[in-house]
Amino acid sequence: MSLLRKHLELVSVLIAAIPMVVVFRNLWAQFTMWPMTDVLTHAVKLHFFQTIGWGGLTQQWNYGVGYVLFATYPPGFFLIAFPIMQFLQWVNVSQTILPAMMVSAFLLVVGIIFLVHRFLVKNFFQTIILVSLVFFNPLSINWLFETGRFPELTGWFFFIPILGMIIHHFNKPLSWNELFWIGFLFSLLMISHPAVFTMALLAWGIFSVLTFTNNSWKNSTPILLSVLLSSPWLIPYFQAKKDLLLSTYVGYHLEASYIFTNFFHVVSVIILLFLAFRSRDQSHPLSGWWTSHAVLGVITLLGIPALIPFFNQPHQVTYVTYFFLIGIHGILSAHPAFTRGIIHRAVPFLVLLFLLTSVYSAAKFVDFAGERDIHTLYGSEIDTLPSFIESPLTCYPECGGELSYWVINDAISSTDNFSPEATPITIARNRESLSRGMETGDCTTIRLSLQNLQTKTLLAYPAFCPTLESCGFSTQETNHWCISPVP
C-alpha cells in the first residue's frame, strides 16, 4: 500500500509539473516574435532602463511632457531582468530583451517553488501540487504568462516568505529580527507589485488582529520599515500620480464574462468556508485565519472592494490568486489525515483536469502570438516605416503594442504610450478633443488638437482617411493605417 502511495505521489508530481514545462516551452516560441500583449510594454521599459536609466526622462513616450521611467510603475522585475539582459549581450545573443524576460520568469518560478517548500509546506510532493494548482492553473497561465504579467509574478515571489512567516507565528511572537526581515520583504514587494503588496497588507492586518496582545504595536514595524526603505520609489510615485490618469485608476471589477476568474473565485471561497467550518470545534490556531478569509472572499465576490479606496486598486484576479493560495495551503497542511485522503484520491484527478485545460491554454500560445504578432499583422510595414514619417507621431484611435516595437527598433517618438494609466492628463484631454473632432469631422478641432499635441505625423485607421482628406490633409493609405503628415 505504501509503495502504491509513493508511486501515486510520484505520478501526481510529474502530472503537476507538465503544465510548467509546456508553459515555458511555448513562452520561448512566443518570445521569438513580438506578441501584442503586456510583454511589449515591459520590453520597452527594459529598453528604457538600458538607454536612460532609473528616473530618466524620455520623449519617445508622451512627447511634449515626457515619460519618466519607473515614476509610475514599480521597478522590481526590471532589476532582475536587466542584469540577465546584460549577460546575454555579453555572450553576443542577438535579441536580448524578450529572452531576458523569459529567463527571469523561469527563475522566478524556480524561486517560488523553493520558497513554497521552505516557508509553506515541507513535503516536496505538496510543494509541486501547490505551485501547480495556484500558479499554473488555466487562470494563472492566462493572467501571468500569456499576457506577460511578470512584475506580478515577482510580487508573488516576495509574498510567499511573508505568508509563511505569518502562518508559522500564530502560536509564538515574532522576534525583532523577524519583524525587520518581514519589513525588508514588504519593501521589496512594494517596489515589485503594489497590488500584491495590498494582499500582503491584508494578510498582515488579519494576523495582527487575530494575535492582538499588549505588544501588538510591534506589528506596525514592518509596514513603517517598508515605507521607509521603498521611499526612493514611493515618493516620486505619489508626486507623479496626481498629474496622470493613474490618479483615477480603479483595478477591481468583477469579470462577469470571464468564466475562469469567477470559477476560481467561487472555488476559493468554498475551500475557505470548508476550512473554517471543519476547524470551528477543533481550536485550530488558524481557524480565525480561514474564517476571516472566507468572509473577505464573499465580500470580494460581491464586488465590494471596487467601492473602497486603496483596496479597489488590485484586479479581481489578484484577489482570487491570494484566496486560492490561502485555501490550497490550508487543504494541504491543516488536517494531515483528512488531507492525505484528498491527496491520494482527488488531487491527482484535479491536477489532471487542470493539466488538460492548462495544456490547451498553453498550446494556444503559438497561435495567440502568431495571430497577434506584429510581424504577422504588419509584415514589412512595421519593420521599415515609410521614410516620410516624422516624429512625433500620434495614433488614432490607438497604436497598441506596435508602438513599443517602433520605439525600440525605429527610435520613434510619440504622444502615445503603451501604458495608458501613465498618460499625462494634459495629453489625455487633447486626445479626447482629437477623438471628438475625428468622430464628428470637425476640421478645426482636429487641427487644434494635433497642434497642441505637437504632432508631425498622424496614423489613423483607414476608415478615417475620407475625414482627413475632407479637412485638407494629404494621406497615404496602407493596409492598416491612413498616414497623414501634419503641416
Image: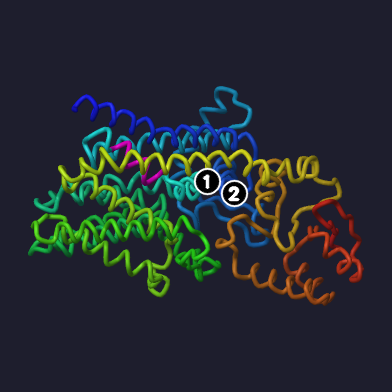
Q: Nearer the viewer, residue 426 or 57?
A: 426
- Colour scheme employed for the rendering of this structure: rainbow
Q: Nearer the viewer, residue 305 or 124?
A: 124
Q: Residues within 10 Å of mark 2 (few under 14, many from 20)?
A: some
Residue farthest toward the top in the current orientation of the protein: 91
Q: Is residue 256 above or below residue 384?
A: below
Image position, residue 178 (x, y; %): 18, 47
Residue 292 is covered by the magenta coloring: no
Q: Residue drawn 72% across and 63% down? A: 397
Res 399 → quadrant:
bottom right
Amino acid beneath label 2: Thr
Q: Is residue 436 above or below residue 271?
A: below
Image position, residue 371 (x, y; %): 68, 45
Mark pair 1, 2: CA separation? 7 Å
In screen coordinates, is 281 left or right of 404? left
Q: Residue drawn 79% across and 60% down? A: 461
Q: Give the residue number, with chain letter if any, for mark 1.
A: 148
Q: Is residue 483 above or below residue 111?
A: below
Q: Residue drawn 21% across and 56% down? A: 275
Q: Residue drawn 80% across and 40% down? A: 380
Task: Please identify the dominant SS of the magenta region.
Answer: helix
Residue 130 is covered by the magenta coloring: yes
Q: Which residues are magenta?
A: 127-136
In screen coordinates, is 89 left or right of 338? right
Is mark 1 in CB contact (under 8 Å) with mark 2? yes
Amino acid beneath label 1: Gly
Q: Give the residue number, with chain letter if any, for mark 2.
A: 37
